[in-house]
Protein backbone atom coordinates (compact mmCIF):
# COMPACT_ATOMS: atom_id res chain seq x y z
CA UNK A 1 0.00 0.00 0.00
CA UNK A 2 1.29 3.45 -0.83
CA UNK A 3 2.02 5.45 2.29
CA UNK A 4 1.80 8.84 0.69
CA UNK A 5 4.34 10.93 -1.17
CA UNK A 6 7.66 10.98 0.60
CA UNK A 7 9.13 14.28 1.73
CA UNK A 8 11.93 14.71 -0.83
CA UNK A 9 13.54 11.34 -0.12
CA UNK A 10 17.22 10.93 -0.86
CA UNK A 11 18.18 9.26 -4.07
CA UNK A 12 17.94 5.46 -4.03
CA UNK A 13 20.48 5.04 -6.79
CA UNK A 14 22.92 3.40 -4.35
CA UNK A 15 20.52 0.46 -4.06
CA UNK A 16 20.52 -0.31 -7.79
CA UNK A 17 23.24 -2.91 -7.61
CA UNK A 18 23.52 -5.54 -10.34
CA UNK A 19 26.77 -7.48 -10.01
CA UNK A 20 27.82 -11.14 -10.18
CA UNK A 21 27.37 -11.29 -6.40
CA UNK A 22 23.74 -10.12 -6.46
CA UNK A 23 22.98 -12.31 -9.47
CA UNK A 24 24.44 -15.30 -7.64
CA UNK A 25 22.21 -14.57 -4.66
CA UNK A 26 19.08 -14.45 -6.82
CA UNK A 27 20.02 -17.54 -8.83
CA UNK A 28 20.55 -19.74 -5.77
CA UNK A 29 17.86 -18.25 -3.51
CA UNK A 30 15.67 -21.37 -3.33
CA UNK A 31 18.67 -23.50 -2.41
CA UNK A 32 19.39 -21.06 0.41
CA UNK A 33 15.78 -21.23 1.58
CA UNK A 34 15.85 -25.04 1.60
CA UNK A 35 19.02 -24.96 3.70
CA UNK A 36 17.29 -22.54 6.06
CA UNK A 37 14.46 -25.03 6.43
CA UNK A 38 16.94 -27.79 7.31
CA UNK A 39 18.67 -25.59 9.88
CA UNK A 40 15.34 -24.71 11.50
CA UNK A 41 14.26 -28.36 11.81
CA UNK A 42 17.63 -29.83 12.81
CA UNK A 43 17.49 -28.89 16.55
CA UNK A 44 14.08 -30.58 16.93
CA UNK A 45 14.11 -33.14 19.77
CA UNK A 46 10.52 -33.10 21.05
CA UNK A 47 11.62 -31.94 24.53
CA UNK A 48 10.21 -29.10 26.59
CA UNK A 49 12.73 -26.31 27.08
CA UNK A 50 11.69 -25.54 30.65
CA UNK A 51 11.12 -21.88 31.45
CA UNK A 52 9.04 -19.62 33.68
CA UNK A 53 6.85 -18.27 30.89
CA UNK A 54 6.34 -21.58 29.11
CA UNK A 55 5.40 -23.24 32.43
CA UNK A 56 2.82 -20.49 32.96
CA UNK A 57 1.32 -21.01 29.50
CA UNK A 58 1.18 -24.78 29.95
CA UNK A 59 -0.30 -24.49 33.42
CA UNK A 60 -3.12 -22.19 32.29
CA UNK A 61 -3.81 -24.43 29.28
CA UNK A 62 -4.04 -27.51 31.53
CA UNK A 63 -6.52 -25.72 33.79
CA UNK A 64 -8.59 -24.78 30.75
CA UNK A 65 -8.68 -28.40 29.65
CA UNK A 66 -9.67 -29.53 33.17
CA UNK A 67 -12.50 -27.01 33.31
CA UNK A 68 -10.93 -24.85 36.05
CA UNK A 69 -10.95 -21.71 33.94
CA UNK A 70 -8.28 -19.18 33.05
CA UNK A 71 -6.35 -19.67 36.30
CA UNK A 72 -2.86 -20.54 37.47
CA UNK A 73 -1.59 -21.50 40.95
CA UNK A 74 -5.12 -21.22 42.26
CA UNK A 75 -5.59 -17.59 41.13
CA UNK A 76 -7.34 -16.01 38.10
CA UNK A 77 -4.69 -15.16 35.55
CA UNK A 78 -4.53 -11.43 34.68
CA UNK A 79 -1.10 -11.29 33.12
CA UNK A 80 -0.48 -13.40 30.04
CA UNK A 81 -2.37 -12.96 26.78
CA UNK A 82 -4.78 -15.83 25.98
CA UNK A 83 -3.58 -16.79 22.51
CA UNK A 84 -1.00 -19.44 23.37
CA UNK A 85 -2.85 -21.00 26.37
CA UNK A 86 -5.95 -21.56 24.22
CA UNK A 87 -3.76 -22.88 21.41
CA UNK A 88 -2.12 -25.39 23.78
CA UNK A 89 -5.51 -26.37 25.18
CA UNK A 90 -6.75 -26.93 21.65
CA UNK A 91 -3.85 -29.25 20.84
CA UNK A 92 -4.51 -31.09 24.11
CA UNK A 93 -8.17 -31.59 23.19
CA UNK A 94 -7.34 -32.73 19.66
CA UNK A 95 -4.55 -35.16 20.54
CA UNK A 96 -6.05 -36.34 23.85
CA UNK A 97 -2.87 -35.84 25.89
CA UNK A 98 -0.42 -33.16 26.95
CA UNK A 99 2.28 -34.15 24.48
CA UNK A 100 4.22 -31.12 23.27
CA UNK A 101 5.47 -32.63 19.99
CA UNK A 102 2.48 -31.32 17.95
CA UNK A 103 2.97 -27.89 19.48
CA UNK A 104 6.66 -27.85 18.55
CA UNK A 105 5.78 -28.93 15.00
CA UNK A 106 3.35 -26.01 14.85
CA UNK A 107 6.12 -23.63 16.00
CA UNK A 108 8.39 -24.93 13.22
CA UNK A 109 5.63 -24.35 10.68
CA UNK A 110 5.24 -20.79 11.99
CA UNK A 111 8.98 -20.29 11.44
CA UNK A 112 8.64 -21.45 7.82
CA UNK A 113 5.72 -19.06 7.40
CA UNK A 114 7.81 -16.18 8.76
CA UNK A 115 10.67 -16.96 6.35
CA UNK A 116 8.37 -16.97 3.31
CA UNK A 117 6.49 -13.92 4.58
CA UNK A 118 9.67 -11.88 5.10
CA UNK A 119 10.85 -12.75 1.60
CA UNK A 120 7.53 -11.67 0.07
CA UNK A 121 7.38 -8.51 2.21
CA UNK A 122 10.87 -7.22 1.38
CA UNK A 123 10.52 -8.16 -2.28
CA UNK A 124 7.43 -5.95 -2.54
CA UNK A 125 9.49 -2.76 -2.09
CA UNK A 126 13.14 -3.67 -2.66
CA UNK A 127 15.31 -5.67 -5.04
CA UNK A 128 15.09 -9.46 -5.00
CA UNK A 129 18.68 -9.92 -3.87
CA UNK A 130 18.03 -7.64 -0.86
CA UNK A 131 15.00 -9.80 0.01
CA UNK A 132 17.22 -12.90 -0.18
CA UNK A 133 19.86 -11.38 2.14
CA UNK A 134 17.27 -10.21 4.69
CA UNK A 135 15.42 -13.54 4.65
CA UNK A 136 18.62 -15.53 5.15
CA UNK A 137 19.69 -13.18 7.93
CA UNK A 138 16.38 -13.65 9.76
CA UNK A 139 16.37 -17.42 9.20
CA UNK A 140 19.94 -17.87 10.46
CA UNK A 141 19.43 -15.81 13.60
CA UNK A 142 19.98 -18.16 16.53
CA UNK A 143 17.21 -16.62 18.63
CA UNK A 144 14.79 -17.02 15.75
CA UNK A 145 15.68 -20.71 15.42
CA UNK A 146 15.59 -21.22 19.19
CA UNK A 147 12.08 -19.77 19.44
CA UNK A 148 10.96 -22.30 16.84
CA UNK A 149 11.61 -24.95 19.53
CA UNK A 150 10.17 -23.11 22.53
CA UNK A 151 6.60 -23.18 23.82
CA UNK A 152 6.48 -19.41 23.73
CA UNK A 153 4.48 -16.71 21.97
CA UNK A 154 7.37 -15.20 20.00
CA UNK A 155 7.06 -17.27 16.83
CA UNK A 156 3.25 -17.05 16.38
CA UNK A 157 3.44 -13.35 17.24
CA UNK A 158 6.18 -12.72 14.66
CA UNK A 159 4.12 -14.59 12.06
CA UNK A 160 1.16 -12.35 12.87
CA UNK A 161 3.28 -9.19 12.52
CA UNK A 162 4.69 -10.30 9.14
CA UNK A 163 1.24 -11.28 7.83
CA UNK A 164 -0.23 -7.94 8.93
CA UNK A 165 2.55 -5.95 7.27
CA UNK A 166 2.33 -8.05 4.10
CA UNK A 167 -1.43 -7.54 3.94
CA UNK A 168 -0.87 -3.80 4.47
CA UNK A 169 1.46 -3.74 1.46
CA UNK A 170 -1.04 -5.64 -0.70
CA UNK A 171 -3.93 -3.24 -0.06
CA UNK A 172 -4.40 -1.34 -3.31
CA UNK A 173 -1.86 -3.54 -5.13
CA UNK A 174 -2.00 -3.79 -8.91
CA UNK A 175 -2.14 -7.59 -8.72
CA UNK A 176 -5.77 -8.63 -8.26
CA UNK A 177 -4.87 -11.84 -6.42
CA UNK A 178 -2.86 -9.92 -3.86
CA UNK A 179 -5.66 -7.39 -3.40
CA UNK A 180 -8.06 -10.29 -2.81
CA UNK A 181 -6.00 -11.63 0.10
CA UNK A 182 -4.80 -8.25 1.40
CA UNK A 183 -7.49 -7.58 4.01
CA UNK A 184 -7.59 -11.22 5.07
CA UNK A 185 -3.83 -11.25 5.73
CA UNK A 186 -4.02 -7.85 7.39
CA UNK A 187 -6.91 -8.75 9.71
CA UNK A 188 -5.72 -12.29 10.56
CA UNK A 189 -2.18 -11.08 11.17
CA UNK A 190 -3.36 -8.29 13.47
CA UNK A 191 -5.61 -10.63 15.45
CA UNK A 192 -2.88 -13.28 15.78
CA UNK A 193 -0.42 -10.68 17.03
CA UNK A 194 -3.02 -9.12 19.35
CA UNK A 195 -3.82 -12.36 21.22
CA UNK A 196 -0.18 -13.38 21.65
CA UNK A 197 1.96 -10.61 23.10
CA UNK A 198 1.63 -7.14 24.68
CA UNK A 199 4.17 -5.83 22.14
CA UNK A 200 1.23 -5.85 19.74
CA UNK A 201 0.78 -2.30 21.05
CA UNK A 202 4.01 -1.35 19.24
CA UNK A 203 2.61 -2.48 15.90
CA UNK A 204 -0.76 -0.88 16.66
CA UNK A 205 0.78 2.48 17.59
CA UNK A 206 2.98 2.53 14.48
CA UNK A 207 -0.03 1.65 12.35
CA UNK A 208 -2.19 4.37 13.93
CA UNK A 209 0.49 7.05 13.39
CA UNK A 210 1.00 5.95 9.78
CA UNK A 211 -2.70 5.86 8.98
CA UNK A 212 -3.44 9.21 10.63
CA UNK A 213 -0.54 10.82 8.76
CA UNK A 214 -1.77 9.40 5.45
CA UNK A 215 -5.35 10.52 6.08
CA UNK A 216 -4.54 14.10 7.10
CA UNK A 217 -1.62 14.62 4.74
CA UNK A 218 -2.65 12.69 1.63
CA UNK A 219 -6.39 11.91 2.13
CA UNK A 220 -5.90 8.16 1.74
CA UNK A 221 -9.23 6.39 2.12
CA UNK A 222 -7.57 3.00 2.43
CA UNK A 223 -5.78 4.22 5.55
CA UNK A 224 -9.20 4.84 7.09
CA UNK A 225 -10.10 1.26 6.25
CA UNK A 226 -6.88 0.11 7.91
CA UNK A 227 -7.77 2.05 11.05
CA UNK A 228 -11.22 0.48 11.00
CA UNK A 229 -9.75 -3.04 10.75
CA UNK A 230 -7.38 -2.28 13.63
CA UNK A 231 -10.21 -0.96 15.78
CA UNK A 232 -12.35 -4.01 14.98
CA UNK A 233 -9.53 -6.36 15.94
CA UNK A 234 -9.05 -4.49 19.22
CA UNK A 235 -12.75 -4.67 20.09
CA UNK A 236 -12.96 -8.36 19.16
CA UNK A 237 -9.94 -9.16 21.31
CA UNK A 238 -11.26 -7.25 24.31
CA UNK A 239 -14.64 -9.01 24.05
CA UNK A 240 -13.05 -12.47 23.86
CA UNK A 241 -10.31 -11.78 26.42
CA UNK A 242 -10.92 -14.20 29.35
CA UNK A 243 -8.86 -12.12 31.77
CA UNK A 244 -11.57 -9.48 32.24
CA UNK A 245 -15.25 -8.90 31.79
CA UNK A 246 -16.11 -5.94 29.60
CA UNK A 247 -14.04 -3.76 27.29
CA UNK A 248 -10.94 -2.40 28.98
CA UNK A 249 -7.67 -2.68 27.10
CA UNK A 250 -5.54 -1.26 29.92
CA UNK A 251 -6.43 -3.63 32.80
CA UNK A 252 -3.98 -6.36 31.86
CA UNK A 253 -0.97 -7.08 34.06
CA UNK A 254 1.55 -5.95 31.45
CA UNK A 255 -0.38 -2.75 30.76
CA UNK A 256 -0.68 -1.92 34.46
CA UNK A 257 3.00 -2.60 34.98
CA UNK A 258 3.97 -0.36 32.06
CA UNK A 259 1.72 2.49 33.23
CA UNK A 260 3.17 2.28 36.75
CA UNK A 261 6.72 2.49 35.38
CA UNK A 262 6.26 5.04 32.62
CA UNK A 263 6.06 7.84 35.21
CA UNK A 264 9.67 6.89 36.08
CA UNK A 265 10.76 7.08 32.45
CA UNK A 266 13.77 9.30 33.02
CA UNK A 267 15.41 7.21 35.72
CA UNK A 268 14.46 3.94 34.02
CA UNK A 269 15.94 5.16 30.74
CA UNK A 270 19.17 6.24 32.43
CA UNK A 271 19.43 2.84 34.07
CA UNK A 272 18.68 0.75 30.95
CA UNK A 273 20.07 2.87 28.10
CA UNK A 274 23.63 1.57 27.96
CA UNK A 275 22.60 -2.01 28.61
CA UNK A 276 20.03 -1.89 25.82
CA UNK A 277 22.42 -0.46 23.23
CA UNK A 278 25.60 -2.31 24.17
CA UNK A 279 24.26 -5.71 25.22
CA UNK A 280 20.68 -6.53 24.30
CA UNK A 281 20.53 -5.06 20.80
CA UNK A 282 23.89 -6.53 19.64
CA UNK A 283 23.04 -9.87 21.23
CA UNK A 284 19.67 -10.05 19.47
CA UNK A 285 21.22 -9.27 16.06
CA UNK A 286 24.77 -10.69 16.20
CA UNK A 287 24.22 -13.36 18.91
CA UNK A 288 27.18 -11.75 20.72
CA UNK A 289 27.63 -8.60 22.80
CA UNK A 290 30.71 -7.63 20.68
CA UNK A 291 32.30 -5.75 23.64
CA UNK A 292 34.26 -2.82 22.09
CA UNK A 293 32.57 -3.20 18.70
CA UNK A 294 29.06 -3.01 20.13
CA UNK A 295 28.63 0.75 19.71
CA UNK A 296 29.74 0.89 16.02
CA UNK A 297 27.54 -2.13 15.25
CA UNK A 298 24.50 -0.60 16.95
CA UNK A 299 25.15 2.67 15.11
CA UNK A 300 24.95 0.79 11.81
CA UNK A 301 21.71 -0.94 12.81
CA UNK A 302 19.96 2.19 14.09
CA UNK A 303 21.21 4.30 11.18
CA UNK A 304 19.84 1.70 8.78
CA UNK A 305 16.53 1.62 10.67
CA UNK A 306 16.27 5.38 10.17
CA UNK A 307 16.79 4.86 6.45
CA UNK A 308 14.00 2.28 6.46
CA UNK A 309 11.75 4.68 8.40
CA UNK A 310 12.32 7.34 5.74
CA UNK A 311 11.22 4.97 2.99
CA UNK A 312 8.69 2.78 4.85
CA UNK A 313 7.44 4.58 7.97
CA UNK A 314 5.38 1.64 9.29
CA UNK A 315 8.39 -0.67 9.20
CA UNK A 316 11.02 1.63 10.67
CA UNK A 317 8.81 3.26 13.29
CA UNK A 318 8.32 -0.05 15.09
CA UNK A 319 12.05 -0.30 15.87
CA UNK A 320 12.22 2.96 17.77
CA UNK A 321 8.85 2.57 19.52
CA UNK A 322 9.95 -0.87 20.74
CA UNK A 323 13.29 0.53 21.97
CA UNK A 324 11.44 3.18 23.97
CA UNK A 325 9.21 0.52 25.52
CA UNK A 326 12.21 -1.63 26.41
CA UNK A 327 13.91 1.32 28.07
CA UNK A 328 11.02 1.35 30.54
CA UNK A 329 9.71 -2.18 30.85
CA UNK A 330 11.97 -4.99 29.74
CA UNK A 331 15.52 -6.18 29.21
CA UNK A 332 14.75 -9.34 27.23
CA UNK A 333 16.63 -9.46 23.88
CA UNK A 334 14.12 -11.85 22.28
CA UNK A 335 11.51 -9.06 22.28
CA UNK A 336 13.50 -7.52 19.41
CA UNK A 337 12.59 -10.47 17.19
CA UNK A 338 9.48 -8.62 16.00
CA UNK A 339 11.68 -5.97 14.32
CA UNK A 340 14.49 -8.30 13.22
CA UNK A 341 13.47 -8.11 9.51
CA UNK A 342 13.50 -4.31 9.67
CA UNK A 343 16.90 -4.25 11.41
CA UNK A 344 18.33 -6.57 8.77
CA UNK A 345 16.90 -4.43 5.98
CA UNK A 346 18.41 -1.33 7.58
CA UNK A 347 21.76 -3.09 7.95
CA UNK A 348 21.77 -3.89 4.23
CA UNK A 349 20.76 -0.36 3.22
CA UNK A 350 23.34 1.40 5.36
CA UNK A 351 26.12 -0.87 4.03
CA UNK A 352 25.01 -0.16 0.47
CA UNK A 353 25.12 3.55 1.18
CA UNK A 354 28.56 3.38 2.80
CA UNK A 355 30.07 1.33 -0.05
CA UNK A 356 28.48 3.14 -2.98
CA UNK A 357 31.80 4.71 -4.02
CA UNK A 358 33.74 1.44 -3.89
CA UNK A 359 34.81 -0.32 -7.04
CA UNK A 360 32.33 -3.09 -7.96
CA UNK A 361 34.72 -5.91 -7.07
CA UNK A 362 35.68 -4.42 -3.69
CA UNK A 363 32.06 -3.51 -3.01
CA UNK A 364 30.90 -7.08 -3.58
CA UNK A 365 33.57 -8.51 -1.30
CA UNK A 366 32.86 -5.92 1.40
CA UNK A 367 29.13 -6.66 1.33
CA UNK A 368 29.71 -10.42 1.33
CA UNK A 369 32.07 -10.10 4.31
CA UNK A 370 29.72 -7.92 6.37
CA UNK A 371 26.69 -10.12 5.67
CA UNK A 372 28.64 -13.29 6.39
CA UNK A 373 30.06 -11.87 9.63
CA UNK A 374 26.60 -11.60 11.18
CA UNK A 375 25.56 -15.02 9.92
CA UNK A 376 28.74 -16.78 11.10
CA UNK A 377 28.39 -15.28 14.58
CA UNK A 378 24.85 -16.62 14.74
CA UNK A 379 25.99 -20.01 13.47
CA UNK A 380 28.31 -20.19 16.50
CA UNK A 381 25.28 -19.79 18.75
CA UNK A 382 23.42 -22.30 16.58
CA UNK A 383 26.15 -24.88 17.26
CA UNK A 384 25.64 -24.39 20.99
CA UNK A 385 21.90 -24.83 20.51
CA UNK A 386 22.44 -28.10 18.64
CA UNK A 387 24.72 -29.36 21.41
CA UNK A 388 22.13 -28.48 24.02
CA UNK A 389 19.31 -30.16 22.09
CA UNK A 390 20.96 -33.41 21.06
CA UNK A 391 24.05 -34.19 23.15
CA UNK A 392 23.58 -36.69 25.98
CA UNK A 393 20.72 -36.41 28.44
CA UNK A 394 18.72 -33.30 27.59
CA UNK A 395 18.08 -32.29 31.22
CA UNK A 396 21.84 -32.44 31.87
CA UNK A 397 22.80 -30.26 28.89
CA UNK A 398 19.85 -27.82 28.90
CA UNK A 399 20.91 -24.75 30.85
CA UNK A 400 23.79 -26.86 32.18
CA UNK A 401 21.39 -29.04 34.18
CA UNK A 402 20.10 -26.17 36.32
CA UNK A 403 16.47 -27.38 36.26
CA UNK A 404 17.03 -30.87 37.66
CA UNK A 405 16.66 -29.68 41.25
CA UNK A 406 13.36 -27.94 40.40
CA UNK A 407 12.02 -31.21 39.00
CA UNK A 408 13.05 -33.08 42.16
CA UNK A 409 11.62 -30.37 44.43
CA UNK A 410 8.33 -30.41 42.50
CA UNK A 411 8.02 -34.12 43.25
CA UNK A 412 8.73 -33.49 46.96
CA UNK A 413 6.10 -30.71 47.03
CA UNK A 414 3.58 -33.03 45.36
CA UNK A 415 4.19 -35.65 48.07
CA UNK A 416 4.30 -33.41 51.17
CA UNK A 417 2.04 -30.42 50.46
CA UNK A 418 -1.80 -30.59 50.37
CA UNK A 419 -3.54 -29.39 47.22
CA UNK A 420 -5.18 -26.38 48.88
CA UNK A 421 -2.01 -25.13 50.63
CA UNK A 422 -0.08 -22.10 49.37
CA UNK A 423 3.67 -22.37 48.87
CA UNK A 424 6.15 -19.51 48.40
CA UNK A 425 9.25 -20.44 46.46
CA UNK A 426 11.75 -19.69 43.67
CA UNK A 427 10.89 -20.44 40.03
CA UNK A 428 7.30 -20.58 41.20
CA UNK A 429 5.74 -21.07 37.75
CA UNK A 430 7.83 -24.16 37.06
CA UNK A 431 7.24 -25.69 40.50
CA UNK A 432 3.50 -24.93 40.34
CA UNK A 433 3.10 -26.57 36.94
CA UNK A 434 5.22 -29.64 37.72
CA UNK A 435 3.81 -30.24 41.21
CA UNK A 436 0.19 -29.30 40.63
CA UNK A 437 0.27 -27.21 43.82
CA UNK A 438 -0.25 -23.51 44.48
CA UNK A 439 3.37 -22.32 44.38
CA UNK A 440 3.40 -18.54 44.15
CA UNK A 441 6.00 -15.89 43.50
CA UNK A 442 6.07 -12.25 44.47
CA UNK A 443 4.73 -11.32 41.05
CA UNK A 444 1.73 -13.64 41.44
CA UNK A 445 1.05 -12.21 44.91
CA UNK A 446 1.00 -8.65 43.54
CA UNK A 447 4.36 -7.38 44.79
CA UNK A 448 5.36 -6.11 41.33
CA UNK A 449 2.97 -3.14 41.41
CA UNK A 450 2.12 -2.92 45.12
CA UNK A 451 3.58 -0.38 47.53
CA UNK A 452 6.78 -1.63 49.19
CA UNK A 453 5.44 -0.85 52.67
CA UNK A 454 2.45 -3.14 52.04
CA UNK A 455 4.47 -6.21 51.00
CA UNK A 456 3.93 -8.10 54.31
CA UNK A 457 0.15 -7.60 54.16
CA UNK A 458 0.01 -8.56 50.49
CA UNK A 459 1.83 -11.81 51.27
CA UNK A 460 -0.30 -12.48 54.38
CA UNK A 461 -3.41 -12.06 52.25
CA UNK A 462 -2.45 -15.26 50.39
CA UNK A 463 -1.87 -17.13 53.68
CA UNK A 464 1.21 -19.15 52.64
CA UNK A 465 1.95 -22.10 54.90
CA UNK A 466 4.99 -23.59 53.12
CA UNK A 467 8.29 -22.08 52.03
CA UNK A 468 10.95 -23.24 49.59
CA UNK A 469 14.48 -21.88 50.01
CA UNK A 470 17.28 -20.99 50.41
CA UNK A 471 17.32 -17.20 50.14
CA UNK A 472 19.91 -17.06 47.36
CA UNK A 473 17.62 -19.15 45.15
CA UNK A 474 14.78 -16.72 45.81
CA UNK A 475 17.00 -13.71 45.15
CA UNK A 476 17.85 -14.98 41.68
CA UNK A 477 14.27 -14.52 40.40
CA UNK A 478 12.22 -12.99 43.22
CA UNK A 479 14.15 -10.34 45.14
CA UNK A 480 11.16 -8.91 47.10
CA UNK A 481 10.31 -12.33 48.54
CA UNK A 482 13.99 -13.02 49.26
CA UNK A 483 14.17 -9.78 51.23
CA UNK A 484 11.01 -10.66 53.18
CA UNK A 485 12.52 -14.01 54.15
CA UNK A 486 15.85 -12.43 55.08
CA UNK A 487 14.29 -10.02 57.58
CA UNK A 488 11.97 -12.65 59.06
CA UNK A 489 8.62 -11.46 57.68
CA UNK A 490 8.23 -14.87 56.01
CA UNK A 491 9.61 -17.17 58.67
CA UNK A 492 10.38 -20.90 58.26
CA UNK A 493 9.01 -23.02 61.12
CA UNK A 494 9.50 -26.79 60.70
CA UNK A 495 11.82 -28.56 58.32
CA UNK A 496 10.13 -31.05 55.95
CA UNK A 497 12.72 -32.14 53.43
CA UNK A 498 15.46 -31.05 51.07
CA UNK A 499 16.87 -31.80 47.65
CA UNK A 500 20.62 -32.11 47.14
CA UNK A 501 21.96 -31.52 43.64
CA UNK A 502 25.35 -30.56 42.18
CA UNK A 503 23.75 -27.28 41.12
CA UNK A 504 22.59 -26.44 44.64
CA UNK A 505 20.30 -27.44 47.48
CA UNK A 506 16.61 -26.68 47.91
CA UNK A 507 14.70 -27.18 51.15
CA UNK A 508 11.02 -27.24 52.04
CA UNK A 509 9.62 -26.05 55.37
CA UNK A 510 6.37 -24.92 56.88
CA UNK A 511 6.26 -21.17 57.40
CA UNK A 512 4.38 -18.29 58.95
CA UNK A 513 3.99 -14.63 57.98
CA UNK A 514 4.83 -12.10 60.70
CA UNK A 515 3.64 -8.55 60.06
CA UNK A 516 6.05 -6.22 61.89
CA UNK A 517 4.83 -3.18 63.79
CA UNK A 518 7.52 -0.98 62.23
CA UNK A 519 8.48 -0.54 58.57
CA UNK A 520 9.76 -3.92 57.45
CA UNK A 521 12.49 -2.47 55.22
CA UNK A 522 14.25 -1.18 58.37
CA UNK A 523 14.48 -4.61 59.96
CA UNK A 524 17.94 -6.20 60.19
CA UNK A 525 18.93 -9.01 57.87
CA UNK A 526 18.62 -11.99 60.24
CA UNK A 527 18.19 -14.86 57.77
CA UNK A 528 16.28 -17.21 60.12
CA UNK A 529 18.01 -20.53 60.60
CA UNK A 530 16.31 -23.84 59.93
CA UNK A 531 16.70 -26.79 62.27
CA UNK A 532 17.53 -29.49 59.76
CA UNK A 533 18.25 -33.07 60.84
CA UNK A 534 21.96 -33.66 60.99
CA UNK A 535 23.17 -35.96 58.27
CA UNK A 536 24.67 -39.24 59.44
CA UNK A 537 28.44 -39.49 59.43
CA UNK A 538 28.28 -42.50 57.22
CA UNK A 539 26.14 -42.03 54.13
CA UNK A 540 23.64 -44.74 53.36
CA UNK A 541 25.07 -47.56 51.27
CA UNK A 542 23.70 -48.82 48.03
CA UNK A 543 22.78 -52.53 47.71
CA UNK A 544 25.89 -53.08 45.58
CA UNK A 545 28.14 -51.54 48.24
CA UNK A 546 26.48 -53.64 50.97
CA UNK A 547 27.03 -56.85 48.92
CA UNK A 548 30.70 -55.97 48.35
CA UNK A 549 31.25 -55.30 52.05
CA UNK A 550 29.60 -58.62 53.08
CA UNK A 551 31.78 -60.51 50.60
CA UNK A 552 34.87 -58.78 51.95
CA UNK A 553 33.85 -59.65 55.55
CA UNK A 554 33.31 -63.33 54.66
CA UNK A 555 36.74 -63.48 53.04
CA UNK A 556 38.32 -61.85 56.09
CA UNK A 557 36.64 -64.33 58.47
CA UNK A 558 37.75 -67.25 56.33
CA UNK A 559 41.32 -65.96 56.29
CA UNK A 560 41.25 -65.49 60.07
CA UNK A 561 40.09 -69.08 60.63
CA UNK A 562 42.80 -70.40 58.31
CA UNK A 563 45.43 -68.34 60.12
CA UNK A 564 44.30 -69.70 63.52
CA UNK A 565 44.38 -73.27 62.23
CA UNK A 566 47.92 -72.80 60.90
CA UNK A 567 48.99 -71.34 64.25
CA UNK A 568 47.47 -74.27 66.16
CA UNK A 569 49.26 -76.77 63.92
CA UNK A 570 52.60 -75.01 64.45
CA UNK A 571 52.02 -74.99 68.23
CA UNK A 572 51.25 -78.73 68.23
CA UNK A 573 54.37 -79.51 66.21
CA UNK A 574 56.50 -77.39 68.54
CA UNK A 575 55.08 -79.19 71.60
CA UNK A 576 55.77 -82.59 70.05
CA UNK A 577 59.35 -81.58 69.21
CA UNK A 578 59.98 -80.34 72.75
CA UNK A 579 58.52 -83.49 74.31
CA UNK A 580 60.79 -85.63 72.14
CA UNK A 581 63.92 -83.80 73.39
CA UNK A 582 63.12 -84.14 77.14
CA UNK A 583 65.13 -86.82 79.32
CA UNK A 584 63.45 -90.20 79.93
CA UNK A 585 64.58 -90.59 83.65
CA UNK A 586 62.14 -89.42 86.24
CA UNK A 587 63.44 -87.04 88.86
CA UNK A 588 63.74 -88.21 92.48
CA UNK A 589 61.19 -87.30 95.01
CA UNK A 590 63.66 -85.12 96.80
CA UNK A 591 64.57 -83.24 93.64
CA UNK A 592 62.48 -80.22 92.84
CA UNK A 593 60.39 -80.35 89.68
CA UNK A 594 61.99 -78.10 87.04
CA UNK A 595 59.94 -76.29 84.46
CA UNK A 596 60.13 -77.60 80.90
CA UNK A 597 60.80 -74.08 79.59
CA UNK A 598 63.65 -71.89 80.78
CA UNK A 599 62.54 -69.34 83.31
CA UNK A 600 63.90 -65.87 83.38
CA UNK A 601 65.28 -64.85 86.69
CA UNK A 602 63.70 -61.44 86.45
CA UNK A 603 60.21 -62.92 86.09
CA UNK A 604 60.50 -64.85 89.44
CA UNK A 605 59.64 -63.35 92.83
CA UNK A 606 62.60 -62.36 95.02
CA UNK A 607 61.84 -64.95 97.72
CA UNK A 608 62.39 -67.76 95.20
CA UNK A 609 65.75 -66.54 93.89
CA UNK A 610 67.64 -68.62 96.50
CA UNK A 611 65.85 -71.83 95.57
CA UNK A 612 66.58 -71.21 91.92
CA UNK A 613 70.28 -70.72 92.71
CA UNK A 614 70.37 -74.03 94.66
CA UNK A 615 68.59 -75.79 91.79
CA UNK A 616 71.07 -74.46 89.26
CA UNK A 617 73.97 -75.61 91.42
CA UNK A 618 72.59 -79.14 91.78
CA UNK A 619 71.87 -79.40 88.07
CA UNK A 620 75.38 -78.37 87.12
Image (cartoon, rainbow, N blue to C red):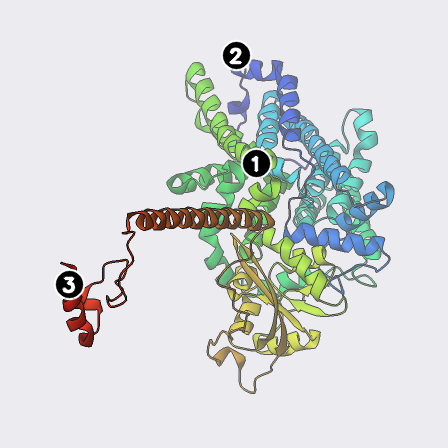
Q: In the image, residue 240 lies at what x, y percent?
A: 84, 54
Crowding at dot 1, Cα within 10 Å, few <14 / some 14-19 / many 20+, comes out as: some
Locate residue 362: give its quadrant.
top left
Going from the N terminus, do you reach mark 2 or mark 1 first?
A: 2
SS category of the residue bearing label 3: helix
User: Regarding mark 2 in the picture, which secondary structure is present there?
Assistant: helix
The total number of labels drawn is 3
Q: In which quarter of the image is the N terminus?
A: top right
Residue at the disc numbered 1: 385
Q: Residue 20 carries which label?
A: 2
**Going 58% across and 36% down the picture, which residue do you hit?**
392
Q: Can residue 133 be seen in this view?
A: yes
Viewer-proximal residue, 201 or 452?
452
Query: Which tag is nearer the camera, tag 2 or tag 3?
Result: 3
Q: Of the two numbered discs 2 and 3 on the same chain, state the one appearing first in sequence.
A: 2
Mark 2 vs mark 1, CA separation in Å: 34 Å
Say above or below: 368 vs 547. Answer: above
Q: What element carries label 1?
A: helix
Amino acid sequence: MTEGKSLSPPSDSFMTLDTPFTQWLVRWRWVFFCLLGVLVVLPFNGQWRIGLDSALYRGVAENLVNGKGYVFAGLPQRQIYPGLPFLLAGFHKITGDNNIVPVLIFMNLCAFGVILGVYGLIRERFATWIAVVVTCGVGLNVRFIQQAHEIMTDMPFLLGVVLAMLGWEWIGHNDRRKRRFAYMFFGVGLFLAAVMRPTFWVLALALVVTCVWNVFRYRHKTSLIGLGVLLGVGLLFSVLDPRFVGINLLKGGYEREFLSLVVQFQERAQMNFLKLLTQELPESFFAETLTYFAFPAVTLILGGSLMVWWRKPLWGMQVFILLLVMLVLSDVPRYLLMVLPTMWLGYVLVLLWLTQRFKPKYRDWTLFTMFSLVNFLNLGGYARLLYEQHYGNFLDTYRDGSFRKQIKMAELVRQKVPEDAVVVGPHANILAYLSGRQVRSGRIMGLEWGAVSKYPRLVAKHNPTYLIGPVNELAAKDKPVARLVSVGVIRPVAFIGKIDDPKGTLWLTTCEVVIPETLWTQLPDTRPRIDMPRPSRRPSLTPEEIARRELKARRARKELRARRERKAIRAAREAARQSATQPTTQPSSTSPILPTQPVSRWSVPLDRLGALWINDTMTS
